[in-house]
Amino acid sequence: MPKWDVIVVGGGAIGMAIAYELALGGCKVALVERGELGKQASWAAAGMLAPRAEELEDGPLLQLCLQSLVLYPEWTAQLQRLSGIDTGYWPCGILRPCLEGETVAADHLLSCPQLDELQSGLGPQVVSAGWLPNEGQVDNRQLVSSLRAALTEVGAIAIPKTEVQQWEIDGDRVVAVQTSRGRLEADAFVLAGGAYSSDLLDIPVRPLKGQMLMVHDPDCQLQHVLYGRGIYIVPRRDGRIVVGATEEDVGFEDGNTGGAIQSLLQRAIVVFPKIAELTLLETWWGYRPTTPDLLPILGTGPQDNMYVATGHHRNGILLVPATARVMARLMLNGDRDSLLQHFSWRRFQAAELSTV
C-alpha cells in the first residue's frame, strides 16, 4: 500500500467532504469506511438546513451553522459541476407551525390568511406559523452520491468495507492505522467516524437513534419544510416527503418500531392532514453522533498529526460545508478558525488513542 498525505477514517458526508476539500488542495487522500460510503447517519438524515428553525442558542454552534448555510449555494454548485450529480439543494424556506396553545419564536410570524396564501393544506389546529425564508434543505442522499462521485474526480481514493482497528503510534505522532485489510501509512489522519468515533478515541460520542419514514405525494402540494414540535416534514421536489424523527438513547439498537412510526404519523397528520392519504414508501433509522453538550468535536486531536471531526448531533448535513472548509484550512495552511476553540476534544476528559 502507498503512503498517503492524509487518511480520513469515516466515510459519511463529513468525512467525504473533508477528503474532497483536502484533495482539491493538492493532498493525496485515502478515505477508509467500515461500510458503504455515506450509508450511515448521512443516508438516514432529512437534509434540513435549519439553524434558526432548530432554535439553537446564540453561541459558537449557531455561528458555525449560519456560516455553513451561507456556504451551501456556492459549495453545492461546485460539487455538482465536478460530479455531474444534483445535490438537491433547495432554499425552499421553513415554516414553524404553531398549534393552538403553542408559541413560536420567529422574526416573521404569519397569520392564518397569510399562511394559507403561502402554503395550503395545513391542519385546522395550525393557527399561525413562523416563516424562515432563507432556510431549506438539501437531499442528503443525493448529496452523498454527489460527494462520492466528486471524490473520484479530485483523485481521492475510497476504501469501503474496511474497518480501522487501531492506531499505530510513534511518540507524539500516528504513523499508520491497522485495518481489516492491512496497514495504511500517512502523514496525517482525520477521525470522522460519526457515532462510531469512540471506538477509536476516548471521547464521549454516543449514538442517538432516530426513526423516520417517507411518503409520496404525486401532486407535490407541499412546497416548504414544516418544522413543528416533535416533528418535521421535508418535501422533495419530486413529491417524496420525509417525516422525522424520534430521539432515542438506546445505543445501536436497530429496527423500526410500530409505536415510533405511529407517533410520527399522528404528529405529521395534525400539521399536514393529507399525509394520512399518501402512500408509505419507506421507513428507516439511523444513529446521530452525539456528545454530552450537543456540540461537535472539531480541530486537532491528541497526537500532533491527528485531527477530529465528529459529534455533529442533529446538524451534520447542515455543517458539512463549514466543517470541511475549517478542517481543510487548518490542515493545509495552519489557519485556525476562532470557533474551533469551542469544539476541542480537550473540553472533555483527556483522550487516549488505542495504540500498538
Image: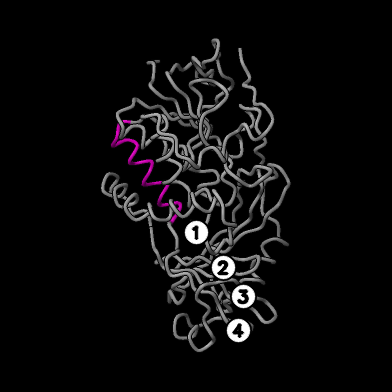
Residue 335 occupies quadrant: top left
Label located before the other in sequence (4 or 3): 4
Q: How far separated are the C-alphas under marks 3 and 1?
A: 20 Å
The label shown at residue 48 is 1
Q: Which residue is drawn at 51% across and 33% down?
A: 299
The label shown at residue 269 is 3
> Do the CB atoms of the residues marked 1 and 4 lie less than 8 Å apart?
no
The image quadrant where one finds the C terminus is top right
Residue 17 x, y percent position in the rendering: 41, 40
Q: How far separated are the C-alphas under marks 4 and 3?
A: 15 Å
Q: Nearer the viewer, mark 3 or mark 1?
A: 1
Label located before the other in sequence (4 or 2): 4
Label 4 sits on residue: 127
Task: Tell me which secondary structure the magenta stretch mostly adopts.
Answer: helix
The label shown at residue 227 is 2
Residue 341 occupies quadrant: top right
Label located before the other in sequence (3 or 1): 1
Q: Residues within 10 Å of mark 4 (few under 14, many from 20)?
A: some
Label located before the other in sequence (1 or 2): 1
Q: What type is the residue that disc 2 sits on? A: Tyr
Q: Residue at x 50, y 89 (%)?
A: 113
Q: What type is the residue that disc 1 sits on? A: Met
> Do the CB atoms of the residues marked 3 and 2 lie less than 8 Å apart?
no
State the extent of the magenta-drawn residues as a range: 139-155
Q: What type is the residue that disc 3 sits on? A: Ile
Q: How crowded is mark 3: few (under 14 residues within 10 Å), some or many (20 or more)?
A: some
Secondary structure type for disc 3: helix
Residue 317 x, y percent position in the rendering: 48, 50
Q: In this view, does 55 lie above or below 200?
A: below
The image quadrant where one finds the N terminus is top left
> Do the CB atoms of the residues marked 4 and 2 lie less than 8 Å apart?
no
